[in-house]
Image (cartoon, rainbow, N blue to C red):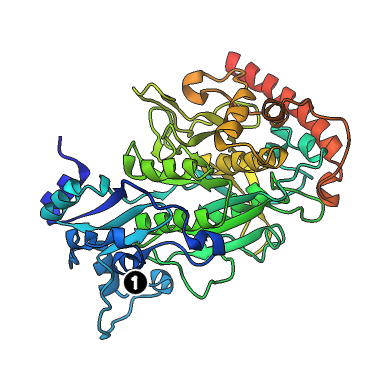
Amino acid sequence: MPSIIDNQIAATGIAQVIVVLKSPPPPSAKAATGAAAGAMALTAAATTTPGLAGLDSYFVQSESSQNFALAVAGMSTVAALTAAPAASTRRVKTPPAVLHFPNLGVLLGTVTREGLGGLRADERVQAVIGASQPSLIRPVTKAAAKLSTQLTWGIQFLEVPRLWNQGLTGKGVRVGHLDTGADGKHPALKKAIAAFAEFDPLGFQVTPIPKPHDTDEHGTHTAATIAGRPVQGRSVGMAPKAELASAIVIEGGNIVARILGGMDWAITQKVRVLSMSLGLRGFFDDFLVVTQVLRARNILPVFAVGNEGPGTSRSPGNYAEALSVGANDNGGAVASFSSSQRFTRTQDPLVPDLVGPGVDVISAKPGGGFQLMSGTSMATPHLAGLAALLFEAKPEATPNDVEAAIFKSCTLGTISPDRGNRGFPNAVLAFSALTGLALGSSKKSPTKSAAKGSKKAASSSKKSSKRSRKESAKSRKK
């Protein structure tokens, strides 16, 4: 059966490919200094890394490539993605034929059939993979909302206030957030974003670094669910003192290059968790190796599984190497839109790994205020925030340790394993599974506003969750 690469070459004469190098480089000096990361032209990279010399000869600068088309259309900059089209007589600046992502150990460029053969024969190359363009996993519903309760239902459902009462807030833990950006002026995010980056349509990091902003609404919502600070005594954030390393990687432009750029940058930011709610419909191994690289770099990848319902899933959220997240409602039932799928592989054959709060989730809205969204994109940041709390509880824990603890905490309830796999997690049980300790009884608060009423919220959470589950069970019996 022809591969995606073969099909592209047959149709256009060229194909964009991801090239995985056999020996991914060790953490570069950039990782130590926190300097700019992301894509760099391979020809420039080869001047300081002799092992890369000559690889550029396999790639071509084609007028049929997406990057060239973006340059010709005057859309090689971020501003141009949203600007009104205008005629231009400027000479087109030719984009690089191939990009190098040093911290991931991969290349991205355009090849002909001859170049493809050369790469596959080169002893420095581990694999050559297709490069399909992912898309944002957009919410299935969105509506204006007011935050009228001290805590969102998702925070209560997972019993997170009981960890807050022990002083666990995610402090000292950095979470990577690759999305549409985040509104740094929102009260919930003003002090949450420790690092910000924007990747242009070709995958290069924008300089000078812009102030944190959102090119949509999606990113602000997901960012605040991870680490939003309390606003007037009300909280939407799972880990209210965690730090966010947020980057704009989607939508528009060469999305593969932008995502690879964001991942490369996230490694330099020393994140412990990477939250992404985007992907390709179906199973594609395009991002498999880089997801494995994240694991090897001590980063837990937490990815949404998709919103296309039973029998479907998205890559990379359907990889065994990702913590794959589906969505449940406040009664503990799997959302009808939440994707689920079984594979023939022996390791982790069923996705998602678990489900989390993803229906009618209230979080921050760009420009101030809050809004309600539903989707696995809303469930994913809940799990990323929970992981941040656990990494604070046990800083020496590995991604495997934290993932295993979350899995051990899961309860199926009335959920079918084919739809929700392990079920939904519990923050208290995950803490005990990770640390081997029972949760103490001290009432040390993370922040004045988050602690305010958290004991009552935790108590009401148990009651409301039990009540909701009973009502949900009754309705299903009927």
For the point 60% across and 52% down, the residue is: 223
Where on the picture, by quarter, is residue 351?
A: top left
Is residue 459 positioned above or below 101 on the image? above
Q: Position of residue 245 (x, y in %)?
A: 58, 57
Is residue 258 positioned above or below 280 on the image? below
Q: Quick one: 453 or 391, which is closer to the camera?
A: 391
Q: Quick one: 332 or 190, which is closer to the camera?
A: 190
Callout 1 secondary element: loop
Neighbours of disc 1 within 10 Å: few (<14), some (14-19), many (20+): many
Q: Position of residue 430 (x, y in %)?
A: 67, 29
Residue 76 in view (yes/no): yes
Circle 1 is placed at which residue position? Answer: 75
**Quick one: quadrant of the C terminus?**
top right
For the point 40% across and 38% down, the residue is: 314
Q: Is residue 114 left or right of residue 360?
A: left
Q: Is residue 388 left or right of residue 275?
A: right
Instruction: Looking at this view, name the residue that lies furthest to the bottom.
Output: 89
Q: Is residue 207 left or right of residue 414?
A: left
For the point 24% across and 68% down, the residue is: 68
